[in-house]
Amino acid sequence: MSKAASFWQSDEMNQRLKKRYAAERRFKALGLLAILVSLAFLAFLLVTMIANGIGGIDWDFITSSDATEPDRAGIFGALKGSFFTMVVTLMLSFPLGVLAAIYLEEFAPKNNRWIEWVEVSINNLAAVPSIIFGLLGLAVFIQVMHLPRSTPIVGGMTLALMTLPVIVIAGRSAIQAVPPSIRDAALAVGASPVQTVFHHVLPLALPGILTGTIIGMSRALGETAPLLLIGMRAFVATPPDGIASDATVLPMQIFLWSGEIDRGFVQNTSAAIIVLLAFLIAMNGIAIYLRNRFETRW
Amino acid sequence: MSPVFALLAVLGLGLIGWFTARAKAQNLHSGRGTLHSLPSYHAWHMAIWVALPAFMGWALWQLIAPGLIENSVLADPAASILPEGDFQRSAILSEARSIAGNPEAVAFNPKARELVPAFAEAIAKYNWIGTALSLLLAFVGGAWGYSKIRAAYPARTQVERTVMLFLLLASLIAILTTFGIIASLIFETGVFFGYVSPADFLLGTQWAPDPFTSATKEGLGEDYGAIPLFWGTIFIGAIIAMVVAIPLGLMSAIYLTQYANPKLRKLLKPVLEILAGIPTVVYGYFAALTIAPMVRDFAIFIGMENPSTESALAAGAVMGVMIIPFVSSMADDSIAAVPSSMRDGSLAMGATKSETIKRVLIPAALPGIVAGIMLAISRAIGETMIVYMAAGAAANLSANPFDSMTTVTFQIAKLLNSEGEFNHPATLAAFALGLVLFVVTLALNIIALRVVKRFREAYE
């Protein structure tokens, strides 16, 4: 007995404990360090962009189009192109995504092989590299359907295919979160299944669906690679006036300017990055606000 | 008669149909007997009958019209200037078609310019016929729908059946997209393998495609060896990026879940997630502008001679940072899935927190963590913009991270941005590379999801 007690208080034991506690502290510090390194990188990136670009943002920069001289070039054309592209993407992916989510969650027959295929392909599409969607857009929309290259309509359609799985997945979980009692109540007073879904379930699931849609759209807004393949990289000095005219988008403008040799374009590129990040932050802010404001905990 | 006009006309007619049908149904309502369906369902029924046949007829017309247009252009006397060869012939025709559609386009071939009037005329004529056809269908459908409005008619059932059809069609888009990806990749790859043998492509070590050499050149396959690209992709995406992302991501997840107090966790986690939300073009620019020169200076500092400005290390490291939140949240999920009884048991035996994490939690969560890393790799090798802006174009087979290296995604983007013919092997090679990329990322995803599923089931 006394021998055991002395063992726990021996110098050897104390040494060992000290070592183990030191290891504990080292491990914890390492974890904190990992986070700090990641955050330092983020801060470094943001500070570099702001330091390089903040001087370039003024009214002329926002309202003029691309030009060959850096101090006359602006992002208005790219903003307009991004706007048209996003409109096409939203018009296609939102209705299709919501309808597909409703079908899969509310009406699809269980244990059906086709439905399983649909679910598998939605989950896989969400993980397919974006450049593959560019190849699809090039092969189908441009080579087969002969739609005009470098236009918001082709870009928007390509991005819509990419955004669709995001909206379907978000929509399904939002619909799933509506409690069955809502459906039962509607059915009990004589609503048809379609009426139940469109009049009662969908309005309650809408905030969740919108949050997912905004997140999907913000990803599409920052996407460059698929648009590179369908030719949205032309030098466009006049802002596009519709979804069928030559256009470029904001991330593509950043890419195009980054390849310019003139030092003046460094400021333009960084300034355009600041504008793009501001848009993305605003969109994500809206998504978070929607989630906090309208999310009901049943 | 532009297609937009036809579209608007059909929509307008549908709207008119909606209101007339509702008015008629409301009249029935105020009369004797009861309606089976509400007036608004009769209205929708009518609108569907106006719009759906018209749109379907119009879509069908869009499928057959190009063939008819081409036939009528070929019958035109202007078409006699066309050369005999099939390949040139279709090139000139497609150029003339695009100029007819968009007058600002530039003609590279003077013969195309001469065919433009014939094309414009034929397009206008057949568009006119298409518009007339769809308007006719709208009226016929509308008349049929209008004749159906009776008190006992189950309009709601019919409308709901149509809605169900649309729901089903919308969910089939996903399958259609997957099928479209696979079909277009396999088709173009098949054409590519007609020029270059698969063995040359998959096993060759020299990559130097030139869009301006003749497609039937002797020994063409020697320039299409993709091994350097595969190596570059693995080296940048699966080695350098993971060397950065795995320790940082895993340790951040451990700190956030095991050590940080809830307040700090709530603050730090979204901030860390910002890293995943920054567009890749921004990372690419940052890598090229800031990180690459730093890497180059470092290479000079450690005594390398004449290092290149574009390095695998700069691209891979920045890509690794981009992946951190991804690895971190996957690790977070897997650690959270380990039953707390295992953790409590270890702590109760007197192990410190870090010992518990290292000896109990991580081994127990390992399958999930490995699956998360596989998903992270599949994302990293599919990443385009960072390597396009920072990794370089030289196809080097080298293990030196300071060398310029190229990847599969880089070459896809580059091949499709050179102004070559679409049916040239140098362009088609992009689709073959795309197919390889698609298959590899798909395999990684399927295996990873299966591992995660089995791992979850083990603890439930």
Image (cartoon, coloured by chain):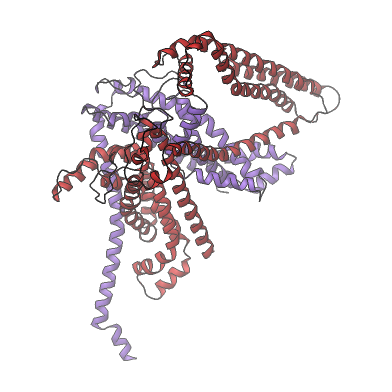
Chain colours: A purple, B red
Left/right placement of residue B381 relative to residue B40 reads: left
Residue A19 location (% of width, % of height):
26, 73
Position of A39 relative to B52 (above/below): below
Furthest-right residue in this view: B32
Q: Which of B164/A171 is in front?
A: B164
Which residue is painted at 52% across and 26% down in the image? A145
Left/right placement of residue B117 relative to residue A277 reads: right
Q: Quadrant of the N terminus of chain A?
A: bottom left
Position of B155 relative to B366 (above/below): above
Residue A154 location (% of width, % of height):
47, 27
Q: Which of B251/A244 is in front?
A: A244
Which residue is painted at 48% across and 16% down in the image? B101
Position of B388 relative to B120 (above/below): below
Residue B158 location (% of width, % of height):
74, 31
- Residue B70 visible in the snapshot: yes
- Residue A223 visible in the snapshot: no
Q: Which of B97/B270 is in front?
A: B97
